[in-house]
Image: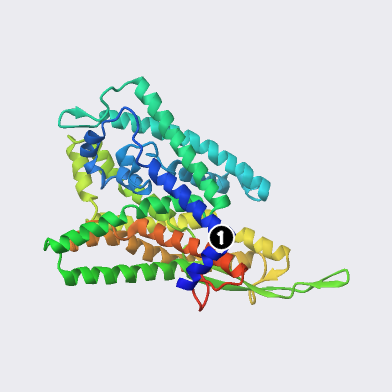
Amino acid sequence: MIKTIESVFKIPELRKRILFTLALLVVYRVGGHVPTPGIDAKVLAEASRSMGGSLLGLYDMFVGGAFQKATIFALGIMPYISASIILQLLGAVIPYFQKLQKEGEEGRRKITQYTRYGTVLIAAMQALGTTIYLESLSSAGSHVVPHPGMSFRLLTMITFTCGTIFIMWLGEQITERGIGNGISLIIFIGIIARFPNGVVDEIKMIFMGQRNLFAEIFLVALMVGVVAAIVLVTRAQRKIPVQYAKRVIGRKMYGGQSTHIPLSVNTAGIIPIIFAQSIMFAPSTLASFFPNSEFMQSLHSWFAPGMVLYSLSYGLLIVFFAYFYTAIVFNPVDLADNMRKYGGFIPGIRPGKRTSEYIDKVLTRITLPGAVFFAVVAVLPYFLMKGMNVQFYFGGTGLLIVVGVALDTLQQIESHLLMRHYDGFMKKGRIRGRM
């Protein structure tokens, strides 16, 4: 491993890409601590302590704590993610966007342009809602915004929107001139920024006698086991063999080779967990806006994190969205038509409709264990917090993102090493990319 790390910095281009990526990530983290004008930071810190179990707490996790501090990067990259998801969903139902997705590089440029426009629109709308929310916050008689009004709203909207656009530009630069997917790395660095505080809290609890040493060892072992299981399931694939018939064109013979279709157990990625968690946090978020409503408070208690009804509903929603999103992003009919167009077929399966039905059947079967596993991982933090008094969320959306992005980044670095005849990070086998 040490020799491999040394090899990484021996390649000038790879070294330049890694240092460039690290520099832009540092810029992102610094911007996450620059306060927005017109906000009392001390009052905001007191007023936002109850944010953790709400939808705003989930949002704050993705932006590395910038939302809770109302910094210039408070909205983070999430408006861009939302715009990308909306464009993907439109591509499944609107013919115009379906056509763009099939036009290659030119179509991707057009979709990217629409995504940027959508990012600006969503960021402006979220910025307006955030300014109204900030004006309503107060603690001990002091208001978060000492001088509310139209001037504050306009300035804050421009600040938040420009911050999101700048982060989007950082992500695109990392993707183009750095290592890996820049958007994913920005979310990744925002999540792991909270890990050191969690580790420090655990160590303090041990020295203060609030945590048994053997329980802490068991927790560390459980963490290692869960991470290993996530890596295994994230990279798990079902390979469907495909045979291409021989074709004679002029004096040359083409085809005749065997290959396979790699169907991932986790085709939908973390999108189902994000959707499900957003819905499950809705009762607590609404209850915070109606503190005097008995019905809303009762609803909040029924769907409080860690309750049986919450965990069951959360798990079922993850499974549902896993199938829903997989059906949107993966089209067996188009795959079967493309195979038939180039003379490919699955041994024992007739080309065309039979092939698409077979692929759909296999995909339906392998999606279930992956969805159930990620539902268990997503619910795990609430049981740890309730049973073992863990002070930070281990598991859930954050852990899945961290593991997935780390594996993709290692794959990018390994591909550069192998291109220049260096050994990768693993002597036995290679880090497989996700589909």
Picture quadrant where residue 50 is located: top left
Q: Is residue 128 above or below residue 346?
A: above
Q: Is residue 198 visible?
A: yes
Quadrant for the C terminus, please. bottom right
Tell me which residue sits at (17%, 39%) in the image.
294
Q: Is residue 395 above or below residue 143?
A: below
Q: Quadrant of residue 353?
A: bottom right
Camera-nearest residue between 303 and 47: 47
Residue 319 is situated, as x and y percent measured from the top left of the image, at 39, 59
Residue under label 1, please give it.
Answer: 14
Q: Quadrant of the N terminus?
A: bottom left
Question: In this orientation, which residue lies closer to the viewer: 414 or 368?
Answer: 414
Residue 308, visible in the rendered structure? no
Q: Is residue 3 left or right of residue 283?
A: right
Vertical relation: 133 (above or below) 107: above
- State the residue in front, 276 or 119: 119
Q: Residues within 10 Å of mark 1 (few under 14, many from 20)?
A: some
- Residue depicted at 17% across the width and 59% down the height: 204
Element under disc 1: helix
The residue sitting at the right extreme is: 251
